Image (cartoon, rainbow, N blue to C red):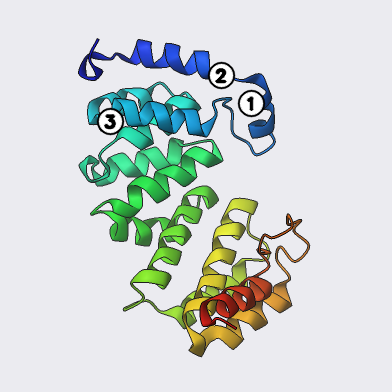
Amino acid sequence: MTVAEVTVAEVMAELAELEDPKIRAVNARHGDDHGVNLGALRALAKRLKTQQELARRLWETGDTAARLLALLICRPKAFERDELDAMVREAGAPKVHDWLVNYVVKKSPHAEELRQAWLADPDPVVASAGWALTTERVAKKPAGLDLAGLLDVIEAEMKAAPDRLQWAMNHCLAQIGIEHPEHRARAVGIGERLEVLKDYPVSPGCTSPYAPVWIEELVRRRDGA
């Protein structure tokens, strides 16, 4: 059977064969309800290649592993704005949300419009997607962004924000401090006052997500100090 002839049922059967209870147990601790090794998932995606309609049908199953696969074989620029908006609201699992934003929305011609809409969304998970897109702009296309205004919002709202929104805002705070020296002292100061993720456990060799440490370490590495 050729790749072009593969059906949703066949893909779902293959994903079921890849299911590993131990991986599911590990993922469950992070809120992700699937047990498929991501390396195996990427290998399957490589074999299937880009198939937009199959990707849409896999997404519609609601299955987390199928949705992750869909995000790997889709054509990001083929989704309409409202389609992406609906997808981010129904993504559910954190890994699906992250891959949707990073692998699809960031490559979409609708990314900036969605960034602005999501940033003010009352749903904290949707708002976190807006902050993730804003962080991308802080790093790559900061022209036109009100960085001081973003710091105002972070300073006022990050401490009490729900976990995923807080994490996204903290990432933006660190990125502003890393990329924009004129705002670095204020970004570090906000991080020190709010102490968000200050005690987050970090594996040896990994950088702390606590913004003051994150900023200092990344600037040091970049400057070769």
Amino acid identity at mark 3: Lys
Mark 2 Cα shell of 10 Å, populated few (<14), some (14-19), many (≥20): some
Which residue is denoted by mark 1 in the rendering? 24
**Label 3, on which residue?**
49
Mark 3 to mark 2: distance in Å?
A: 21 Å
Q: Nearer the viewer, residue 85 or 108?
A: 108
Estimate the x, y position of residue 143 in percent, counting from the top left. 32, 78
Q: Picture coordinates of residue 213 (x, y %)?
A: 68, 73
Q: Report whether 98 appears left or right of 198.
A: left
Identify the residue at image location x=54%, y=26%: 36
Give the residue type that dot 1 points to: Arg
Please say if 90 is above or below 148.
above
Residue 194 screen position, x and y as percent: 71, 73
**The residue positioned farthest toward the bottom in the image shown:** 182
CB within 8 Å, label 3 to label 2: no
Displayed quadrant of residue 73:
top left
Crowd rating for badge 1 (residues with CA inside 10 Å; few <14, some 14–19, many 20+): some
Mark 1 falls on what kind of element?
Answer: helix
Given contact means CB atoms under 8 Å apart, are the residues at marks 1 and 2 in contact? yes
In percent of the image, x 60 and y 75: which residue is there?
A: 215
